[in-house]
Structures are given as C-alpha cells and as structure tokens.
Amino acid sequence: MSRMRTAHIRKEAVTGSNDSGSDGPDTMYVVDLLENGQVVESRKLPGKSSSYAQDVVENWENGIIQLLVD
C-alpha cells in the first residue's frame, strides 16, 4: 500500500521578544505534514523563510523526511 504524503504551509502568530528585539506580535511558518489525509506532525519554523518552509514540503512529499514510529 502506498502512502500519500502532502503538506500545508501556514503562518502562526507568535508573541514575545524576537531576534530583532521587538516585543510585538510576529509570525512564523508552520508546515503540517500529512499522510493519507491525516496530520502526522506540525513543524514550527521560527525565524525561517517561506523558501525554507517550501523545502520542508518538498522533502516530505519526496520521502526525504522520515518520522520515527513506535
């Protein structure tokens, strides 16, 4: 049985201090990794670019990212 892997990129609000010293609300990318339509992991990517998030999606869909399973 083949597994269908997809992923979705979203932005999530983050409050508190960030690297620039700002205390205001900020955002980070979160990549939801799905297998057969079910979220198996959500990877938070604070301080990373949209290109980095897209690379995570591609690596997941191509099978490069492997999750540890009990």
Image (cartoon, rainbow, N blue to C red):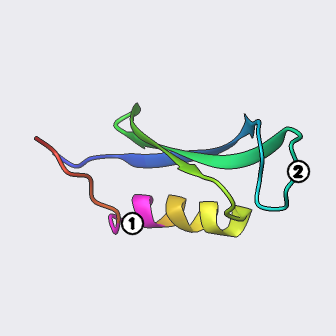
Q: Using the numbered discs, state the Cα–Cα distance from disc 2 to disc 1 in whole angstroms.
A: 37 Å
**Depth order, front residue of 21/61:** 21
Horizontal side of residue 5 vs 7, given as left or right: left
Which residue lies most toward the left here? 70
Residue pictured at 41% horizontal, 32% vertical: 37
Position of 10 with respect to 16 (left or right) is left
Could you tell me which residue is drawn at 72 percent across and 62 percent down?
50
Q: Which residues are magenta?
A: 59-64
The one of 20 and 66 positioned closer to us in this rendering: 20
- Residue type for callout 1: Asn
Which of marks 1 and 2 precedes in the sequence?
A: 2
Q: Secondary structure beneath disc 2?
A: loop
Q: Which residue is mark 1?
A: 62
* Amino acid of disc 2: Ser
Q: Residue at x 77, y 53 (%)?
A: 18
Query: What is the x, y in percent for residue 2?
Result: 22, 49
| 2 or 1: mark nearer the eye | 2
Q: Are marks 2 and 1 in contact (CB under 8 Å)?
A: no
- State which quadrant residue 61 falls in: bottom left
Residue 51 relative to residue 5: left or right = right
Residue at the limit of the structure toward the top, as seen here: 38
Residue 43's x, y, as percent?
49, 48
Q: In the displayed structure, would residue 47 be above or below residue 8?
A: below
Nearer to the camera, 45 or 10:
45
Measuring from the top left, give residue 24's x and y in whole percent: 89, 40
Q: In the rendered image, which residue does mark 2 sit on?
A: 22
The C terminus - image quarter = top left
| Residue 49 lies within the magenta run | no
Quarter location, residue 60: bottom left
Residue 20 position, x and y percent, is 84, 61
* The magenta stretch spans residue 61: yes
